[in-house]
Amino acid sequence: MRKIIYILLVLALAACTTPPEETPDWGEYDPFDVPGPQSAVPLSTLLPPTRAAGEAISTPTPNSARFAPAAEQASGFKIIPDSELVYGPASLLLDIDIYLKAKDGYIKDYKQEVDGEMLTGAEIITRVAQDYSINPRLLLALLEYQSGWVTEAHPVETDFPMRYYLEWYTGLYRQLVWTANELNRGYYLWRTDDVREWTLVNGDLVAVNPNINAGTAALQNYFAMLYTRETWDYDVSEEGFFGTYQSLFGYPFDYAIEPLVPVGIKQPQLILPFERGEVWSFTGGPHGGWDNGSAWAALDFASGAPQGCLPADAWAIASAPGLIVRSGNGAVVLDLDGDGYEQTGWTLLYMHMATDERIPTGSKIETGTKIGHPSCEGGLSNAAHLHFARRYNGEWIPADGNIPFILDGWVSSGTGIAYNGYLRKGEESVEAWDAQNPLNEIKR
């Protein structure tokens, strides 16, 4: 039905000239030579094995007495595996440009200005997929289901293709931004066992079935934001969105990678993302990795006294060795396993990095290499700072969960309120505070 492509990537990388920082206290560590949680894994072992079409798979689900009685629960039909929600290893199987040219739909020739740059439909899909860490196959399938843009040259709906009818969200880019955020919201609410019902567009409540998985929860939440019960029931059934997905890409569970985040996985060794001897402010505790719907995967740090959005003189630095796989629009993505794919293994996101002196894509770096200067570039921000987040196989890893940030021995925790939280090291404690304050000062 489909052929798994084994990818051999040959990169010509310019060696980074910034001298590496002295070895951390925990001793010599090289992720390219030493086996461990950070070591590179062959792509072929991460891609799904061949299985018979329609063959059932086992998907772990929560088991809680707080769910509504079975007779009151909504659909338990599993629509997609978790690995089809995130921008993870299986997304490497899709070449968007080639795929869309073969379909000859409206999106093929679509263009829209985004942040002063004219982007094609394929480039918009890619940008949203990367920023929100959402599988581009899922975005394309939803776009087709909602408006026919993938296969129809002249669809009826061209301004609001994802059917979210607010004027601010006119055009493909903002429609997908809203969609990706709501998909993430459903996915990570399920991941943290924090949802028992969906609120439909008319205010009615739908009791969640405990037999679904996080990927299915993402879609159930998305459709709940748009429709009333009768339409929602159809959308999340085997005849609804599932059918469109299957017609475009085949049986979705053939792409399953399980578990996407292995049980017991540990964070690689990381240092604080600024230079030794400097004092920075811990300005944001656990909050969304990208927008407010994703996992609380990010922490914020700022250097010096507040100076608005002027780029800081100080440098954000590499918390571990690796390869820069993306640099632009304020974002720098550091691939810790060095395989060249941000969809696989551990990655670090450095956000709001100023254009001037920002490290380029393709740089192979060591711990302590200079990444860029904190600024307000690449998103909404009222002051220059570093937004720092982690992903594993494309999934945002919460900073307040069971795999906290550990930075030079400082361990992150949250309070249940976005942006509130602490960094603790032994008896020392630093509290997040959105300003310069002795409470939030932290020194390397």
Image (spheres, helix red, strand yellow):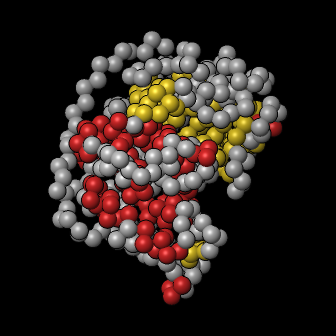
Q: Residue at x 65, y 35 (%)?
A: 380
Residue 53, relative to residue 261: is it above or below? Answer: below
Q: Position of residue 377 (x, y in %)?
A: 61, 27
Q: Give the vertical position of 72 relative to 45 (above or below).
A: below
Q: Is residue 397 left or right of residue 52?
A: right
x, y percent for residue 200: 59, 68
Q: How many marks?
A: 0
The x, y position of residue 235, in whole percent, is 43, 68
Kindly give the residue lying farthest to the bottom in the view shown.
71
Relative to 171, residue 187 above or below: below
Please give left or right for residue 78 compared with residue 70 in the image: left
Q: State the residue at coordinates (51%, 42%).
A: 171
Quarter of the image with the C terminus is top right
Question: Who's the residue at 35% across and 36% down the image?
Answer: 109
Q: Residue at x 50, y 63 (%)?
A: 223
Left or right: residue 42 versus residue 432 is: left
Quadrant of res 236: bottom left
The quarter in which the N terminus is drawn is: bottom left
Hey, which quadrant is residue 110 in on the image? Answer: top left
